[in-house]
Image: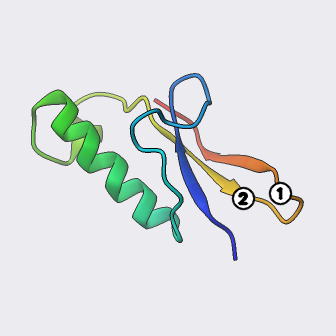
Amino acid sequence: MPQYRLIDHRGAPHPVLDDLYDSLEAAWSDARSWWGQHLGRPEPAEQLEPMAIGIEVSTASGNWRTVRHPG
């Protein structure tokens, strides 16, 4: 089963949201919530400004592939 993780604007694992998620939706929900709090504004955060958070998914070979780029 694939797992998801959040990445920062450089493509590295996010320094605060360093967790594994079972779904893309769960990862993105945490990202949106954190970004809104980070900006001190309510959700939906991506309407306020581009989010410097992306998402990667694990592959069968043990690597990570970007499925949503930051920004």
Relative to 38, is 31 on the left or the right? Answer: right
Which residue is denoted by mark 2 in the rendering?
A: 58
The amino acid type of the residue labelled 1 equals Gly
The amino acid type of the residue labelled 2 equals Ser
Q: Residue furthest top?
A: 10
Q: Residue furthest bottom?
A: 1
Residue 6's spot in the image, x, y percent?
A: 51, 45
Q: Residue furthest right?
A: 61
Snapshot colouring:
rainbow
Element carrying mark 1: loop
Element carrying mark 2: strand
Relative to 34, is 25 on the left or the right? Answer: right
Along the viewing direction, whichever of 44 and 55 lies nearer the viewer: 55
Relative to 21, is 38 on the left or the right? Answer: left
Q: CB of mark 2 within 8 Å of CB of mark 1?
A: yes
Task: Give the label on residue 62, or none.
Answer: 1
Which residue appears at 52% of the width and 69% of the height? 23
